[in-house]
């Protein structure tokens, strides 16, 4: 659906506030990609939306928050080298999104060059929230790097390659402190997906391996 | 360290300076945690959100572009997005709408003097929000800080979806008009 400027401007407030979802959001972003006038209109709303956050009251975090946070930085630093391979493709994905929306970037990755033989796809949870990512090579078998860093409860999960209705166990992943990583290899096809499966057999998140 | 600008602190943190990193966390932890707990309501979940927000700032500090807004704005936007994601997954933890709209809004006098322009705008916005008709003020606080969708605002307020959208849109237009109008005090 192609929206007119007036329709986009009716939705500008919700877009700027980050509460416009799904198709509505996609339609508005499509219009904005080719309408500088509406982009400027939305940008003014973005400024209001950003400033609203300044009105939230301050609050003291729990005792020990600062040292715990600084320790978390330290543990991330040790894992940085392994994450580099993932970050390369993630940066390319972020750059593409930025060029399409041209509205604002809140949390962009660094701008390394993407390795052409790699592709990164989002791992999406049952609520539609991005919970991690899967980077895979175009070789056979494909090298796979699965990373989950958000909103998945701690615990042990099966990692399954989903082809149509069939699930093939390719590994296991432990989520601890909200994070987990798995590296391995598998023979994949274009329409396959990688899913994290809980002990009860429920798929908690899934990534479609589209090349 | 407290006289260092936010931008310089972020730059130091991105470059791996441990002193800058510690100072950055110390400077922003109350803002980040305050916003997180305002949205998610639960201290444990708010701590997770606040820690992840600071972690992302540490990890992506080099990508921060001052032309797009202040460090505070950037960091609070990261925090809000994370908190809303958590709230959508763990809805029972979300703060009650009544509690959110009744919270005392933060005034800008506590900010360091390095952000004078941002202060002025935030102060004007603070006044403008207070001047909104009550139903618009509630709608904009639920949507703008709490991350409630128009449908959720409608449910919380017991009003039709179209009315919720209108209240949000009208409130945003009024606030925008205040910000684009030259400050008479200048």
Image: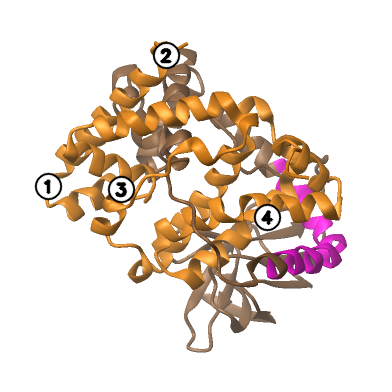
Chain colours: A brown, B orange
Please give the residue where the numbered disc 1 appears in the rendered image: B159
Q: CA distance from mark 4 to mark 1?
A: 42 Å
Determine the secondary structure under disc 1: loop
Instruction: Using a 10 Å C-alpha cutoff, classify the residue at mark 2 as few (fewer than 14 neighbours), some (14 to 19) or many (20 or more).
Output: few
User: Residue A64, image x and y in percent?
Assistant: 65, 72
Horizontal and vertical percent position of residue A76:
78, 64
Q: Earlier in the sequence, mark 4 or mark 2?
A: 4
Q: Which residue is mark 2?
A: B183
**Secondary structure found at label 4:** helix
Q: What is the tally of numbered marks visible in this picture? A: 4
Is residue B31 within the magenta segment? Answer: no
Q: Main secondary structure of the magenta part?
A: helix
Q: The N terminus of chain B is located in which quarter?
A: top right
**Disc 1 or 2, which lies upstream in sequence?**
1
Q: Are marks 4 and 2 in contact (CB under 8 Å)?
A: no
Q: How far apart, in angstroms, are the residues tagged by discs 3 and 1?
A: 14 Å
Secondary structure state at the residue bearing disc 2: loop
Q: Which residue is mark 3?
A: B142
- Residue drawn at x 48%, y 55% is B34
Q: Which mark is residue B26?
A: 4
Tell me the quarter of the picture where residue B128 sits.
Answer: top left
Question: What span is in magenta?
Answer: A68-92
Subunit that carries the residue with mark 4: B
């Amino acid at each position: 659906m192609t929206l007119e400027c007036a329709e986009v401007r009716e939705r500008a407030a919700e877009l700027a506030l980050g509460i416009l979802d799904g198709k509505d959001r996609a339609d508005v972003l499509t219009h904005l990609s080719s309408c500088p006038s509406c982009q400027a209109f939305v940008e003014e709303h973005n400024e209001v939306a950003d400033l609203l956050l300044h009105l939230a009251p301050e609050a003291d975090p729990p005792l020990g928050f600062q040292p715990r946070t600084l320790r978390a930085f330290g543990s991330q630093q040790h894992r940085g080298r392994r994450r580099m391979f993932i970050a390369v493709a993630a940066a390319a994905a972020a750059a593409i999104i930025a060029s399409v929306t041209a509205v604002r970037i809140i949390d962009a990755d660094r701008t390394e060059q993407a390795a052409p033989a790699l592709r990164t796809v989002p791992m999406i949870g049952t609520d539609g929230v991005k919970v991690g990512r899967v980077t895979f090579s175009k070789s056979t078998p494909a090298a796979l790097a699965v990373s989950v860093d958000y909103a998945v409860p701690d615990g042990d999960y099966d990692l399954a390659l989903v082809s149509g209705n069939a699930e093939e166990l390719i590994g296991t992943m432990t989520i601890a402190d909200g994070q987990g990583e798995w590296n391995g290899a598998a023979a994949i096809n274009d329409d396959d997906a990688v899913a994290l499966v809980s002990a009860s057999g429920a798929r908690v998140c899934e990534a479609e391996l589209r090349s | 360290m407290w006289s260092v600008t936010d931008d310089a602190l972020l730059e130091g943190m991105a470059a791996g300076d441990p002193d800058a990193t510690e100072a950055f966390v110390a400077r922003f932890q109350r803002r980040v945690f305050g916003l997180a707990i305002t949205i998610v309501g639960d201290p444990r979940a708010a701590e997770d959100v606040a820690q992840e927000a600071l972690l992302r700032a540490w990890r992506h500090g080099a990508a921060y572009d001052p032309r797009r807004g202040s460090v505070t704005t950037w960091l609070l936007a990261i925090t809000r997005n994370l908190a809303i994601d958590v709230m959508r997954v763990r809805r029972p933890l979300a703060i009650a709408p009544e509690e959110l709209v009744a919270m005392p809004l933060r005034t800008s006098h506590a900010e360091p003097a390095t952000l004078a322009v941002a202060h002025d705008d935030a102060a004007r916005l603070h006044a403008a929000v207070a001047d909104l008709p009550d139903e618009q003020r509630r709608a904009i606080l639920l949507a703008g800080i709490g991350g409630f969708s128009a449908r959720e605002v409608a449910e919380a307020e017991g009003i039709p979806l179209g009315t919720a959208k209108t209240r949000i849109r009208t409130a945003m237009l009024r606030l925008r008009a205040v910000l684009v109008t030259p400050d008479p005090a200048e």
